[in-house]
Image (cartoon, rainbow, N blue to C red):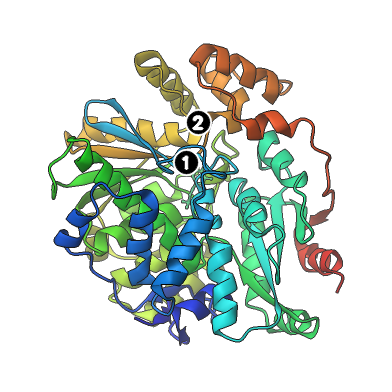
Amino acid sequence: MSMYSTRGHACGTVSQSILWGLSYDGGLYVPSIYPQMSMERLASLCGESYQKIASRVLRDLLEDYSISEIEACVENAYTSENWENKDIVPLTELSGAVYVAELFHGPTLAFKDIALSILPYFIRLAADKNNEKREISIMVATSGDTGKAALEGFKNVAGTSCTVFYPLHGVSKVQQLQMITTDGNNTHVIGVNGNFDDTQTAVKKMLSSNDFRERMNASGKLPSSANSINFGRLIPQIVYYFTSYINLVKNGKIRFGQEVNFVVPTGNFGDILAGYYAKNMGLPIRRLICASNRNNVLTDFFNNGTYYANRCFYQTMSPSMDILISSNLERLLFDLTNRDASLVSLWMNQLKESGSFCIGTERLSQMNKIFSAGYADDMMTAEEIKTVFERTRYLMDPHTAVASRVLRDYRLQTNDHTPSIILATASPYKFAPDVLASLENRPRNASDDFFACSEKLEKMSGMPVPRQIRNLVDLPVRHQRVCEVDDMQKAIFSELGI
Ligand SMILES: *Cc1c(COP(=O)(O)O)cnc(C)c1O
């Protein structure tokens, strides 16, 4: 298995793709084949721990890593110290063949932890394997959750630094506090006067600019990415599709081999793409349901085949999905065109130049054999948080509630009652003011204090406030730099002392 760029001009080993993040031609790295997990092998994993299953799944994907290296990465990443639930991704039954896979029991209370607690270990090994002596300078654009998860993952890791750019007014108070209070000798956090798309586009531009790379190089630094465009971010997410499936079998909820649906709250298309990879590797997945908030560019795309990004950008109560340019979609498009890099390049250029591209009806119907899509705006999301809590006492964060609502609508429209797993991507305590306002059926007040809201939610639900939230109020602010979108390069140079 080697790695190709979706734009056709580059290839390399898995460790190189992890080290470099984005291909120099602007494309994303994809594997030449999908390794197959046979049903016998899948059956043999029933009853095994998350760590064991992770090592088994990752082994086939990390071709130039040894089995013992992979096992060490897994052991270091998924420790009982960092994960308060021993299952790592526990599965809960909600009602009528609907299950929730909780991806938020890691250090920063969001699903990004799954990938970002293991990525630094992949990168360190990748540097060694490729005889890379420069400092690996990780650059991250975040819509809220990736930033903190990356900072925690890379903090104090020798030979690396981690710089996070976040939209100054586009993240929740808790998300901002989590980032700007990060300690460590190699962490940098910069607020950007712009939205997430501006921020992500600027980071991608820096990473593929020769000028930028040369200046970094002259200071002994190799710029790289920890965004979900990095293949090393994607593959740890394939694991929980497998463990969730295995959990249902183990608990007698489905027969071995029976198909399930996954419902995924989607922003940059990384999480759901991992599900598509799991399906291609042989996991019995019937449909992947792509759930968006009011920024429903993907819902429209899956329904009519035109990606149209020139539209109003909305700030919603699910900020990690406030995205109009879904970077990882490019990897799906690559497959959809039978790996036609020139067609993908053409579409990506059209997207850049005119804000849209169209894939045609034939490809659309091919795509719709696997994917369904829907969206929920803030009002529907708030209703869903309340409805689910009243019926089942289960407390959902807004991102998870978007998925839950989209599944409810999907079932009504299609009558497809395949057992379905909702991916719960954040702890409700990361968005306590919005969750509480939803339960109380009132608009959120700007003055709502996240900590007071958390305490109240704890009383209502009996679900304890996580210690990461409790600790937050006492931590000193360590990062205050703010810049304009056009000055991001200048800002990172000053941060890194270049
Ligand atoms: C990042 C994130 C998402 C979206 O995931 P993608 O991989 O970008 O599609 C959804 N929910 C939460 C809480 C997130 O942090």
Question: Can residue 369 be seen at all in this image of the molecule?
Answer: no
In x, y percent, where is residue 165?
Answer: 71, 56
Q: Nearer the viewer, residue 90 or 139?
A: 90
Looking at the rendered structure, the secondary structure element under dot 2 is loop
Mark 1 residue's CB less than 8 Å from ligand 1: yes
What residue is shown with label 1?
A: 425
As displayed, is residue 337 above or below residue 298?
Answer: below
The kind of residue on which mark 2 rests is Asp
In x, y percent, where is residue 52?
Answer: 35, 56
Q: Nearer the viewer, residue 279 or 291?
A: 279
Counting the numbered discs, the total is 2
Residue at figure coordinates x 63%, y 31% from the top left: 467
Q: Are marks 1 and 2 in contact (CB under 8 Å)?
A: yes
Looking at the rendered structure, the secondary structure element under dot 1 is loop
Q: Tag on residue 397?
A: 2
User: Would you call the spot at circle 2 few (<14 residues within 10 Å), some (14-19), or many (20 or more)?
Assistant: many
In x, y percent, where is residue 356?
Answer: 47, 62
Give me the C-alpha separation between circle 1 and circle 2: 8 Å
Mark 2 residue's CB less than 8 Å from ligand 1: yes
Residue at figure coordinates x 15%, y 59% from the top left: 39
